[in-house]
């Protein structure tokens, strides 16, 4: 990013490119591409899988039933969707809401990378298997949902996809439990920064210190 270019300008540029993009086959049947939207400076980014029917019509992420559940989840920790940035791994709707294919995810990856670089979020919440795989390769979502990974000066937190929460009450309950932990994760992140954890991690000194980093802080402090 050029020194005189703001993150807002970078996000606008990415959005313009996404709306014109023909880099994978998903461009053929889209109504509108869905680059993502929200606050850039909140420090919290939610990454889902791909647009669905309603998102494809409106060109906005998480505006259907799954989006309504996401808004309820955010409200549970005092957040509104306008306070976080919301996007997806692929920016165009897979036909019939099928899973995005590896070649489509790969073709779209640079847009997500540039969005992350521009926003530089403190917390990245992955929603569903496909965005989890980007940051937790090889992991199973049933095994790691809600467990933060502290790396790169950030907390990466895998959640189930809200659409899965609409299909299963137990998953919906897990989603609410996992998001309730976000304030404590934000608190722990601040403590790790203050303690120089990420500087040592970068130098390789804390390569085996994941368990220590994942110990929760003693008291709760809301970031929100
Ligand atoms: S999904 Fe991504 S790579 Fe594929 S056409 Fe849409 S914006 Fe381009």
Image: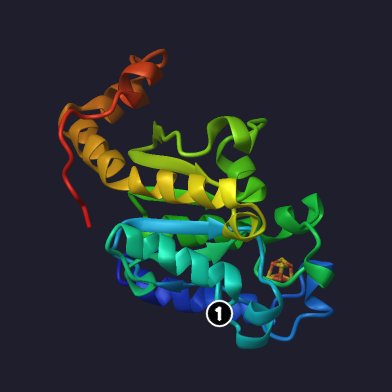
Q: Nearer the viewer, residue 24 or 66?
A: 66
The kind of secondary structure element at disc 1 is loop
Number of numbered discs: 1
Mark 1 crowdedness (10 Å alpha carbons): few <14, some 14-19, many ≥20: many
Vertical side of 203 occupied by 28: above or below:
below
Instruction: Kindly give the residue lying farthest to the front in the view shown.
Output: 169
Check mark 1 vs ligand 1: CB closer than 8 Å? yes or no. no
Q: Horizontally, is 56 left or right of 104 in the view?
A: left
Q: Residue 203: percent from the left, percent from the top?
A: 34, 21
Residue at 84% x, 79% y is 28
Q: Horizontally, is 142 left or right of 83 in the view?
A: right
Residue at 64% x, 41% y is 133
Residue at 23% x, 31% y is 192
Q: Quadrant of residue 60?
A: bottom right
Q: Residue 102: percent from the left, percent from the top?
A: 78, 50
Q: Nearer the viewer, residue 202 or 133?
A: 133
Q: Residue 191: percent from the left, percent from the top?
A: 18, 33
- Quadrant (top left, top right, bottom left, bottom right) of the C terminus: bottom left
Q: Horizontally, is 127 left or right of 104 in the view?
A: left
Q: How are the residues colored? A: rainbow
Q: Nearer the viewer, residue 25 or 178?
A: 178
Q: Horizontally, is 107 left or right of 69 in the view?
A: right
- Quadrant (top left, top right, bottom left, bottom right) of the N terminus: bottom left
Q: Residue 137: percent from the left, percent from the top?
A: 63, 34
Q: Quadrant of ligand 1?
A: bottom right
Residue labelled with disc 1: 60
Residue at 39% x, 37% y is 152
């Amino acid at each position: 990013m050029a020194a005189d270019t703001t993150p807002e300008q970078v996000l606008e540029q990415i959005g313009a490119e996404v709306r014109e993009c023909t880099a994978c086959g998903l461009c053929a049947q889209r109504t509108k591409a869905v680059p993502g939207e929200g606050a850039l400076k909140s420090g919290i980014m939610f990454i889902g899988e791909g647009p669905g029917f309603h998102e494809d019509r409106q060109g906005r992420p998480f505006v259907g039933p799954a989006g309504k559940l996401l808004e309820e989840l955010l409200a549970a920790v005092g957040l509104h969707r306008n306070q976080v940035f919301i996007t997806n791994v692929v920016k165009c709707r897979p036909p019939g809401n099928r899973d995005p294919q590896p070649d489509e995810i790969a073709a779209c990856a640079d847009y997500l990378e540039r969005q992350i670089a521009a926003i530089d979020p403190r917390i990245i919440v992955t929603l569903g298997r496909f965005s989890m795989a980007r940051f937790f390769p090889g992991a199973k979502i049933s095994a790691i949902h809600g467990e933060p990974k502290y790396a790169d000066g950030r907390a990466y937190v895998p959640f189930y996809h809200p659409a899965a929460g609409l299909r299963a009450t137990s998953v919906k309950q897990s989603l609410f439990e996992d998001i309730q932990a976000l304030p404590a994760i934000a608190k722990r992140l601040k403590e790790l920064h203050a303690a120089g954890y990420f500087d040592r991690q970068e130098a390789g000194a804390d390569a085996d210190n994941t368990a220590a980093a994942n110990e929760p802080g003693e008291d709760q402090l809301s970031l929100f």
